[in-house]
Amino acid sequence: MPNQFDIEIDRRAVPALKTHNIVLGEGGENLFPAGVADMDFLAPPPVRKAMQVRLDHGVFGYETVPNALMPALTGWMHSRHGWEINPSHILRSPNVLNTLAIAASIFTEAGDGVIVQPPVFFDFYDILQENGREILRNPLILQDGRYTMDFAGLERLAARPNAKMIYLCNPHNPVGRVWAHAELRMLGDICARHNVLVVSDEIHGDITFEGHAYTPFASLGPAYADNAITCLSPAKSFNIAACCSAIAVVSNDARRKAFQVENSRLTVNKNNAFASAAMTAAYADGGPWLDEALEYLAGNVALVRAALAPLDAVQMIEPDGTFLLWLDFRAMGLMPEELTRFLREKAGWAVTRGQAFGVEGEGFARLNIACTRAKLKAALTQLTAALSNFKTETTK
């Protein structure tokens, strides 16, 4: 039997965003589609079985949350990450971005500042701009191929009178850092001193590599949990982004009640039968599949590392986690638009432009490695050939 992760699935058989011309552009059907952050792997067998059982029932009227979902979620977070979640602190939401947007809407006002740590997930910027909030930028520090937080800069920004919130990305998209316990505690202490609410996007929390453990911010202790809103979803972990919803964990009673009021006002209170089935099965029975997926992804990281090691023009930022690699092409000396054109036209890559994550991302690109090893190997061969030609042309 072949490795389940080596099975090539035709993403174009459905309107997958990754392979759609919305992302690839006209004439991009032959590009290596590695921009959108989902996996090319089949969802876990328990998830597909649960959805099939639900389909076979044949009636799809209004439903409540299955009794098994919350125990599956809390059991997963306890067994995998040592976090005891009070079930009464859990709220459902359509997706993580919805939670981020509602948090900004109800806990800050127009003109208030929200801290971000670029290069960071581009939707953070969109949410804050669309809600009329000031984006307070505290760039990460890149030194010797590793990113760290600028805690001195964070202290200065948090002390500003209009600083009310921080969007934390834990683990961090796109640089692949899994923030350590001590780093999160330092961030939490700074934010507590200045009454800055921590809204933590932890959608990639399950995807970490050996030697790096995901620490849920709210698991640091009651005081940290009281000043936090945690955004969770099994979307990335089990490749079910199109058929699941999200979870918000809000320990503070007043904030949770405010969230409930806003959810009611926006009618964010309906349940999707297939999302409920998929999420319950994923958290209850998806562990063995995820362990195998993580091993396969680690192998893909090793493949990229080996392929890029001899190349002077590109450096892989070593990831602690996520299935997204942050690649540094600055040695090529290209402007951002030129780098995008090179990767697309010469290497045949459709990856996420680094500048989408902020000016700190100029000269970088984000590569999704959650694909078959054969496809990734072919893409790396294309890149190596393109870089060789580039070097020859620039030395003439």
Image (cartoon, grey):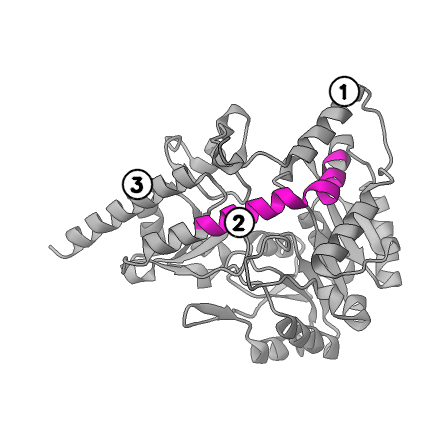
Residue mark closest to the camera, 1 vs 2? 2
The label number, if any, that marks residue 295 in the structure image:
2
Q: Nearer the viewer, residue 222 or 133?
A: 222
Image location (x, y in percent) of residue 352: 45, 48
Q: Residue at x 82, y 50 (%)?
A: 91
Q: Is residue 290 magenta?
A: yes
Residue type beneath disc 2: Glu
Residue farthest to the left, as pictured: 396
The label number, if any, that marks residue 6 in the structure image:
none
Residue mark closest to the camera, 3 vs 1? 1
Disc 1 target residue: 56
Image location (x, y in percent) of residue 259: 83, 54
Disc 3 target residue: 345
Gap in Å between the C-alphas at discs 3 and 1? 46 Å
**Horizontal relation, residue 130 to residue 260: left or right:** left
Q: Nearer the viewer, residue 134 or 97?
A: 97
Residue range of the region highlighted in magenta in the rendering: 277-300
Q: Nearer the viewer, residue 337 or 150?
A: 150
Circle 2: element type? helix
Q: Residue at x 56, y 70 (%)?
A: 138
